[in-house]
Image (tube, rainbow, N blue to C red):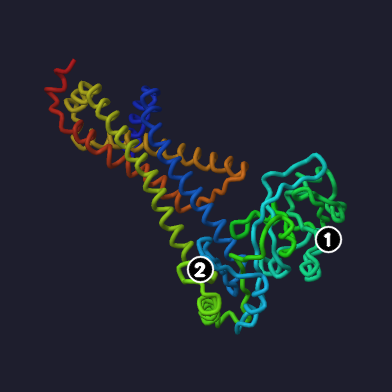
Amino acid sequence: MGKTISIFKEALKNIISNKLRSSLTMLGLIIGIMSVILLVGIGNGATTNVTSSVKSLGTGTLTVSINGESDTTIQYEQIDDFKKITNIESVAPYKNVSGTISKDTTTSRNSSVLATVPEYINILNLKLEAGRLLSNIDIENSSKICMIGNSLTDTLFEDSKIKDIVGQSISIEGDKYTVVGVLTKVGSSMGTNIDNTIIIPFTTAKYLKSDMSINNLYVKVSDENNIEATKSLIENYLERNLQISSDYYSVTSQDSMLDTMSDIRTTLSLLLGGIAGISLIVGGIGVMNVMLVSVTERTKEIGIRKSLGAKRRDILVQFLVESLILCILGGTIGVGFGIGVGTILQIFGFSFNITSTVILISFCSSAVIGLVFGIFPAYKAAKLNPIEALRTE
């Protein structure tokens, strides 16, 4: 035990006595470990957000998308035919339309306008903070009313209270729209930032130079156990009734989307981890180079120790411990910086999600690098001939 403590003390002494060289040695590892933490964390955060959006729809929802290259689309009048398909409870078509949104002198250029129907609100489980939801009367009358996302209240209405916003007007492409409801803050859902979105009746989109064609819709099924059979019925309807080729549409269930996201998440994590791992290897090579320089500089010291009775094993362990300490310190600092920078990115709106498993693997990788890349310099030091070493000036 005393011998082990002595080895660690000697290793720390040698590291501290060469502060600049030790710091530069650890820098490569710090950058490598930090890269692993950040890249994997950002990748996990992005896929977690998308997965959460998919899960928010529940397992009884199908997503129907028609490729923009298709010559045929679904028309709004054909939605009633969709509803007649067995096991379909509700259908929610939606489309993004362009329009400049303003309130007095304030203009929100980053917000989007979504034209849809009341069923859309129910399928996505959107909640109200004030006012009311879209109604079928709004659809029938093509009413110039809207619901606004929570974030837009600060942008367009500044210091107004939420309840006071209902009933006020905003301009979309110069036309006045009455705000009938404010949505509760929910973040992004299925690629749409609901908090920064204006929702208008689907039929009102004609005032924004949009036709009634539909490329995207959600379908809520009555019986989740028969969702695959319902999916087949929808595909048959698209191909036989609307003459849309299977090359131009997709009908996906939430389970299949979750499976796909899981595969993407695994692949992305491995890819990003592999890219960051290259930095670790470069850092490890740096450690080996510095340790080889250290062996050269301390040749005479090694010769003296061997002449006083030190064994090859003692020299080998001494240099391995020094390499290990450098890598563990670099790994610890790298993990700290990675988590710190990731937390800062979250403050600025980036998704960052790192698990304790990734942190542990990253830390252990630094220790393994210390051992692997420290073996050759340690072996070279251990096999030095004491007589030849003592002759070195």
Query: Front-most of 331 and 146?
Result: 146
Q: Secondary structure at mark 2?
A: strand
Disc 1 packing (10 Å; few <14; some 14–19; many ≥20): some
- State the mark number for residue 249: 2
In-front residue for pair 244/89: 244
Residue situated furthest bottom in the rendering: 86
Vertical relation: 327 (above or below) 236: above
Q: Is residue 2 visible?
A: no
Left or right position of 139 against 349: right
Q: Which mark is residue 131?
A: 1
Q: Residues within 10 Å of mark 2 (few under 14, many from 20)?
A: many
Which-is-in-front pick, marks 2 and 1? 2
User: Measuring 76% from the left and 50% from the top, which residue is drawn there?
Assistant: 172
Q: Secondary structure at mark 1?
A: strand
Q: Nearer the viewer, residue 14 or 18?
A: 18
Question: Residue drawn at (70%, 50%), measured in percent from left and top?
Answer: 99
The residue positioned 31% from the left and 32% from the top of the image is: 286
Residue 75, picture quadrant = bottom right
Q: Amino acid at mark 2?
A: Tyr
On the image, the x and y values in percent for residue 133 come to: 78, 65
Earlier in the chain: of badge 2 and badge 1, it is 1
Identify which residue is drawn at 60% across, 84% down.
86
Coordinates of residue 382 in the picture (x, y in percent): 19, 33
Q: Quadrant of residue 365?
A: top left
Q: Is residue 274 left or right of residue 341?
A: left
